[in-house]
Amino acid sequence: MVQTIDLENDVYAVGESLGRQDDCTVGTEVNRVLRRMLVERIALELQPSERPPPLLTIDPETGLPSVKSSQSFTTEVV
């Protein structure tokens, strides 16, 4: 999806710098960082009994969160 957002100059500069290091666009880098921050924020807001296991990771290629679990998930659970 293509959206236009306004970034402050300092945020854009950091995104541009990180994008150069990772050989990707500013938009890709902003998406990666935002995903990481959202995952961390959600984990902090959950009650201790609801917190995800410590095996919560961010896929470096896609930037998507992933959780390793020994529990099986069925369509009914989801």
Image (spheres, grey):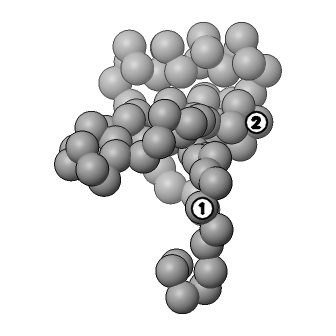
* Residue name at image x 60 percent, y 61 percent: 71
Residue 61's x, y, as percent?
76, 36
Please state which of residues 70 and 29 is positioned toward the viewer in this rendering. Answer: 70
The Cα atoms of the two marked residues, 2 and 1, are separated by: 25 Å
**Circle 1: is it few (<14), some (14-19), or many (20+) Cα within 10 Å?**
few
Q: Amino acid at mark 1?
A: Gln
* Amino acid beneath label 2: Glu
Q: Please give the label number shown on residue 26.
A: none
Q: Secondary structure at mark 1?
A: loop
Q: Which residue matches tag 1?
A: 71
User: Quarter-wise, where is residue 19 in the image?
Assistant: top right
Residue 61: numbered disc: 2
Note whether residue 20 is visible.
yes
Determine whether label 2 and label 1 are within 8 Å by CB.
Answer: no
Q: Is residue 55 left or right of residue 50?
A: right
Is residue 30 visible from the viewing direction of this image?
no
